[in-house]
Image (spheres, rainbow, N blue to C red):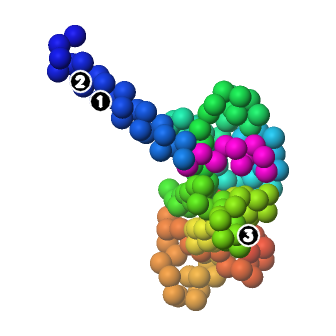
Amino acid sequence: MSDMGWSQYIRRLDDAAAMEEKAREQDMLPWLYKFCDYDSPHAMYRAFYKYTDCGPWVSLRVNGQWVHCQDLHKLGLWKDMVARGDIVDEALIGSIVEGVDAEAAPVSVRLGDIRSARSKSGKVTRHSLRSALGSAVSAVNEQANAIWDETHGCDTCRKHWADEGDVDASEDAFVSVWDECPDCGGHGAII
Ligand SMILES: [Zn+2]
């Protein structure tokens, strides 16, 4: 290896080490392991998916690589990840709205977000972790529901808006849900 090549190689190692150190400072894994209500990333994703209307997706950045939804299964338990020395420096929660090309903007959860606002030293507690993840899920759910309501009006909703004369309610345009619609019950229809 030439001198130039060697110094570049060393610099890359330095960069990698510096990046790892930075990620390590931002590592949320110890807290997820200690305080998460679920014993694995996949169980957490399944619970959010199952118990939230919009069925959000969850991704974790593990050792610099994003791991998504079903693939979280491959990570095993939080315990296994701690044993491997993994670093989790960001969680991302988002939602795709069925039938339209729209998506709730993903909400990021990082170490700063899971610290308790009530603690001067920024302690992480079971409560602060749960509340950070919970607010991210709620924010995504609200957004996804708003998008749904704007776009998933059924034919009867469409007719209602057309009669009101206040929107372009032509056949192919998305119409919003009429909350008193007798047909879809104000829930909208799957597009
Ligand atoms: Zn309707």
Left or right, 164 with respect to 12, comes to: right
- At label 1, which amino acid type do we have? Arg
Residue 21 visible in rendering: yes
Tags 2 and 1 touching, CB below 8 Å: yes
Residue drawn 29% across and 22% down? Answer: 9
Disc 3 crowd rating (10 Å Cα; few below 14, some 14-19, many 20+) is some
Left or right, 11 with respect to 121, comes to: left
Is residue 118 found inside the magenta-colored segment of the image? Answer: no
Residue 152 visible in rendering: no
Q: Say whether mark 1 is within 8 Å of ligand 1.
A: no
Q: CA distance from mark 3 to mark 1?
A: 57 Å
Which of pointers 3 and 1 indicates the residue nearer the eye?
1
> Which residue bears the numbered disc 3?
187
Looking at the rendered image, the quarter that the C terminus falls into is bottom right
Q: CA distance from mark 2 to mark 3?
A: 63 Å
First in residue order: circle 3 vs circle 1:
1
Tell me the SS state at disc 2. Answer: helix
Tell me the SS state at disc 1. Answer: helix
Disc 2 crowd rating (10 Å Cα; few below 14, some 14-19, many 20+) is few
Q: Position of residue 114 (x, y in %)?
A: 66, 60
> Which residue bears the numbered disc 2?
7
What are the residue bounds of the magenta stretch?
Answer: 26-35
- At label 3, which amino acid type do we have? His
